[in-house]
Amino acid sequence: MSDPLLKVEALRIALAGNRTTYNAVEEVSFEIGRGEAFGLVGESGCGKSITALAVMGLLRPPLSLAGGRIVLDGEEIHDASAAEMRRLRGKRIAMIFQEPMTALNPLSPVGRQIAEMFVLHEGMGWSEAMDRAEEALRQVRVPSPERRIRDYPHQLSGGMRQRVMIAIALACSPELLVADEPTTALDVTVQAEIIDLMAELCAAKGTAVLMISHDLGLVANMCRRVAVMYAGRIVEAQPAEAIFKTPRHPYTRGLINSLPRLGERSRRGRQKLQEIAGTVPAIAGYPAGCRFNPRCPEATDVCRVVPPEATPLPADGLVRCHHHG
Amino acid sequence: MAEQPLLALDDLAVHFKVGGALAGGVRTLKAVDGVTLDVKPGECLGLVGESGCGKSTLALAIMGLIPPTHGHIRLDGVDLGQRQRLETARTVQMVFQDPYASLNPRQTVRRTLADPLRLHGVTDRAELDTRVKDMMDRVGLRPDHADRYPHEFSGGQRQRIGIARALILKPRLVICDEPVSALDVSIRAQIINLLLELKDELGLAYIMISHDLGVVEHVSDRVAVMYLGRIVEQGGWQEIFENPRHPYTRALIAAIPDPFHRAAVSARAKAKGEIASALNPPPGCHFNPRCPLKADLCVAEVPTLDAVAPGHRAACHFRDRTG
């Protein structure tokens, strides 16, 4: 990709244990173009959320950046100072979290929390900033924003809180929005609304999205390209349509085939779900070679010894499997 | 008369008193509000709804853990209140959502599985041992792990322990409350397959509570959709998923992202806004503020759960309008 907005290269994140240090994430590379929505999918513990935190410069001990580069718009930010990152966060890159109740300040009215963005990053006075906050609430379709700006987070429903989070994140029209499981805590019908809202606002502002989720279906709907992570590594990346039609990694195939899909039973009758054997390995017990090999139906001797290299696929895709053929 | 249902709920209501003098007076929260439903032996009933719709309260009432405010819960035709507690426990059991929170961390698997047997009069050591090990084997756990503690197992294995505990007394009805939603995605298929195998093998009836419509469609024989304490639609799984008659059911189905048909969701089917508080539900049809078909009638009158086809009922004034 020529001139991407965000470039993550050979990212390594270390987790300091009692005696040893583990690599919680390694060899993670991806690029996100301007205005592009990119999805990072995986199960709990695969390293997707800490990858997002690394991009935000929010890794804290026992986690630390141990290698690789993070480049935003041609500028290296992985070694930026705390002050530089503070100027960047909220202004050029913003983040929304899974649980809006814990991400919002319970002691401050939501209007003030939005207005803060304009005061801090755009040097606005408070009264003008409050007007802008009301406008921002209107944009995320919170009903009667003129009253809602005075509400505290506990007075809002889960969906409304997440709308407030989106309003804060998009207040300064950032170039990149990092969304970590933004709808997991919400009901399904509300989830659909929030995803639509995010997609619409980001498209209107030209904001690129790094969407983190365990839900492959949700990510594929919202994002143009998707990367699948397993045990700290990206095992496959492809355009969203391709990853469902022609998944190349056995883990991706397993994920897609293991979930009951709406309408499938009507079409083909009840089929036994395909299981992925075993369980996700713990970080202290990552197997040698390909980390998926103990659970993989196609594993051979080479998989147990040699970690597979990334093989490029069309459209900036990749697959990390010895038997991807 | 058809075969006697294993479980029959008759106009069941569970109301809670909340608040007090300091919180602006006592108010009534109608968590379950007039639910009539039955489950036949060996049948899987899917119970769908969003958080706060009352589906978990309904489950606890069936388990005898919350007394109903009015209406009846009958097991094998006998009112729950008239039955012996232990006898009920041998008929209905429950599998919980979170296998981390629902197992006693200080009890070995053996103790977790043997205690109910002891309570129900099995005292012979050899028999206890055999039944514990048989059950572990049946749910896919290694019997030689009987003396391990919950923390020594993975999430999926823990849920297998939870299932074994529910089945050890050979119940005929198992209430599964979101049995896979706390598990890793790659583990869910294992547990769903196991539950279906056990159902066929042991002739179990399930109430499968879930917000995941893919799972519900896969496992259910019949489906009931709940909204703010009331059943808004019920019917055979195929009827519900292919010919949904309540706008809320349509909204639930439309909200599922279908990765194979991107953005094919009909905007008309989507629900607006969020579920209202059960403390202050909208008048008439509870769904009316979010409904694309809303009319004056919907505010004035509560729709009854009436038949739209054999075995298929919907509580909507416009149940004959499809789409």
Image (tube, rainbow, N blue to C red):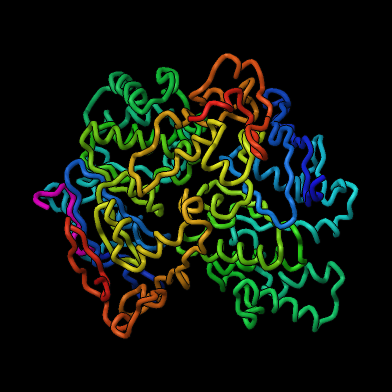
Residue B128 at x, y = what percent?
78, 78
Q: Does the magenta stretch include residue A4?
A: yes
* Residue located at (39% from left, 48% from top): A181
Q: In this view, does B173 lie above or below B234?
A: below
Looking at the picture, tell me which residue is in the foreground, A299 or A58: A299
Asked whether residue A62 is in view, the answer is no
Q: Where is residue A242 in the image (x, y as percent from the top left)?
A: 27, 55
Classify residue A83 as left or right of residue B168. left
Quarter residue A292 falls in: bottom left
* Residue A25, quarter of picture: bottom left
B33 relative position to B79: left or right? left
Residue B105 in view here: yes
Magenta run includes residue A315? no
Of all residues, the one furthest to the left in this rendering is A2
Q: Where is residue A35 in the image (x, y as percent from the top left)?
A: 20, 41
Q: Which residue is drawn at 70% across and 32% down?
A: B30
Q: Is residue A24 above or below residue A57?
A: below
Choose top left, top right, bottom left or bottom right for residue A37: top left
Residue B137 image point, x, y percent: 64, 77
Q: Which residue is drawn at 40% across and 52% down?
A: A215
Task: State the extent of the magenta-drawn residues as a range.
Answer: A1-11
Give the quarter of the figure containing the C terminus of chain A: bottom left
The reply, left or right, for residue B64 in relation to residue B137 is: right
Q: Nearer the viewer, residue A124 or B206?
A: B206
Q: In the rendered view, does A31 fall on the left or right side of B215?
A: left
Which residue is more in the foreground, A41 or B292? B292
Give the mark count. Answer: 0
